[in-house]
Amino acid sequence: MAKNTYRQDENLEEPFDVRHLLRASGYIKKHIKQMMLAITLSGIGGAFGYLAPMIVQRALDEAIPDKNKVMLFTLVGILVGVYTVSVIFTTVRSRIMVNVSQDIIYDIRKDLFAHLQELPFQYYDDRPHGKILIRVVNYVNSVSDMLSNGLINIVLEAFNLLFIIVFMFMVDVQLALVVLCGVPFLAAFLFWIKNRQRKAWQAVSNKNSNLNAYLQENIVGARITQIFAREDENAEIFEGLSEECRGAWHTAVKYSNMVWPGIDSISVCVRAAIFIFGLVIFGQGNKSLGTIVAISSYASYFWQPIMNLGNIFNNFINNIAYLERIFETIDEPVTVKDADDATVLPSINGKVTFEDVCFSYDEKKPVLNHVSFTVNPGESVALVGPTGAGKSTIVNLISRFYNVGTGRVLIDDTDISKVTLKSLRSQMGIMMQDSFIFSGTIEDNIRYGKLDATEEEIIQASKIVCAHDFIDNMPGKYQTEVRERGSMLSQGQKQLISFARTLLSDPAILILDEATSSIDVQTEKALQTGLNAMLKGRTSFIIAHRLSTIRNCDKIMYIDDGGIVESGTHDELMAKKGYYYKLYTAQLDEVG
């Protein structure tokens, strides 16, 4: 496996595109009343908070020099009051916005997950699952804060800046102008640092995405890692990815840690200028101590809204890119979906027809080339041939997991592209080689395809496929909790549970794709009776590595070179001494 496979950074360096915000407005509209209330509360709280320096000015210039205790205590009481009002309003606003933010996260994730459920196999074939996961979790978290607090904070910080400027000019025009002289220096500094800071944090996001994709795959493939003794090599790759994350993080933090010292330096210079101008240049007793202290306080407030607006701008640049990735996922075309005029497929008999079907996963390499055949209701058909010949592709097209390139697939003479997917797949039972087990109880897993199944039906299905005995010997029997992917079960046990799940759904068409590959020969022989019960009266397609298990099929089709090379019963194909004969006898020699 190439080490660079996981170093495929997403291009998050995107221009600010207001169209993404306009599209996101749909998630904001339903919360607009709460957001307006939050803005109002924050505005009132901020206005009260900015009265504090003016109160301190009066205390220093009037109450203390005049030794007016009543006035001093009154001003202290008012100061406590304005701070209390400011804190209360700000706290209520924060609680409102926490709820709004979580509601937006819920709405976006719900839409994302619903769309991911509908995306075809091809989408998941082409992408690391870890990168999909980071969009659903990390990107949505970041975007939700931008859509809620981010938009509100732009308005609030603009109002805060306006309040501070107005209060400064109310206190003293000349000293207010001294404060504003520091703005060009701050703007130049922020312009220099913010672009570097934004790119650095985007790099952190990319490196975390790569690490997440590699980590997720290695957790799932931990057994394979140990089987092939790949621990050291994988640890080396992980160490490299982690080092890239650490390096990117250190770079980002370096720029972030430069922001406040830079702003503090400018702030200190401006406040020093206030005292110099106030006491020396504008001096001659024209500027009182209270005035200078008040302007100095407002000057310290003045930089915060500007700094916050710079941070919000950077976050918007980053999150617009995240938002684009989210919408990119939501916009991913559902290529396998119900047609606008799709009808419900009625109960089927099980006749399956391929009419001149061509298919390829990409345009460069065709997999099926003008394949035609008919399987009558109740017939069992085995598909054999070399690896990659197209056997699994045929059964995937019957289930319409992919759309055919040209030609048609029909069930009971109905084109399956004209019926709803739910009505089609609900009448099919599909057993894959990789039997997926969900977290939950064994009973939940068996009932997965038929939620209204009774306990007796579940036990009966398990007995037919020889799963009941090992389930009954487990500590919790059918209520035994199994972990993700059934890690506490053997591969054979997982396949038997999947057999029970498939049988319980009572499908009209049954597909077994290497379904007994992980079951030992002795269990398979015992299972054969159950399999015969499953196959009876059902159209079935069987892909099996052990050819001895398909001898009794009504038809065997040898698939190779994009089509059906030969077809017939076991005896007919053995008599021909063609491809099937060579494959069968070669396997007998291996067993012998």
Image (cartoon, rainbow, N blue to C red):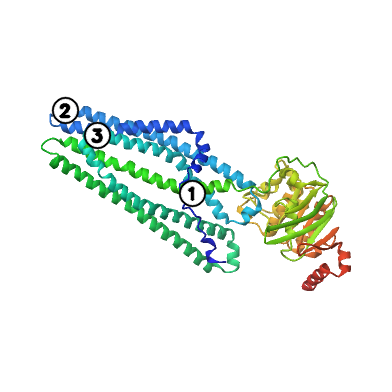
Q: Is residue 329 above or below residue 576?
A: above
Mark in the foreground, 2 or 1: 1
Quarter where residue 303 is shown: top left
Instruction: Decide which of 194, 116 is in the foreground and name it.
Output: 194
Q: Quadrant of the N terminus?
A: bottom right
For badge 3, the amino acid type reads Phe
Is residue 364 toward the left or the right of residue 48 in the image?
right
Farthest-out residue, left: 284
Whether tag 2 and tag 1 are in contact, CB under 8 A, the answer is: no
Q: Position of residue 367 (x, y in %)?
A: 72, 60
Element on which disc 1 rests = helix
On the image, numbered disc 2 is attached to which residue?
69
The numbered dot on residue 321 is 1
On the image, numbered disc 3 is attached to which residue?
169
Quarter where residue 246 is shown: bottom left
Element on which disc 3 rests = helix
Q: Position of residue 213 (x, y in %)?
A: 54, 57
For badge 2, the amino acid type reads Lys
Mark 2 surroundings within 10 Å by alpha-carbon count, few (fewer than 14), some (14 through 19), many (20 or more) = few
Mark in the foreground, 3 or 2: 3
Q: CA distance from mark 2 to mark 1?
A: 58 Å
Mark 3 surroundings within 10 Å by alpha-carbon count, few (fewer than 14), some (14 through 19), many (20 or more) = some
Q: Is residue 356 above or below residue 47?
A: below
Q: CA distance from mark 3 to mark 2?
A: 29 Å
Residue 465 in view (yes/no)? no
Mark 1 surroundings within 10 Å by alpha-carbon count, few (fewer than 14), some (14 through 19), many (20 or more) = many
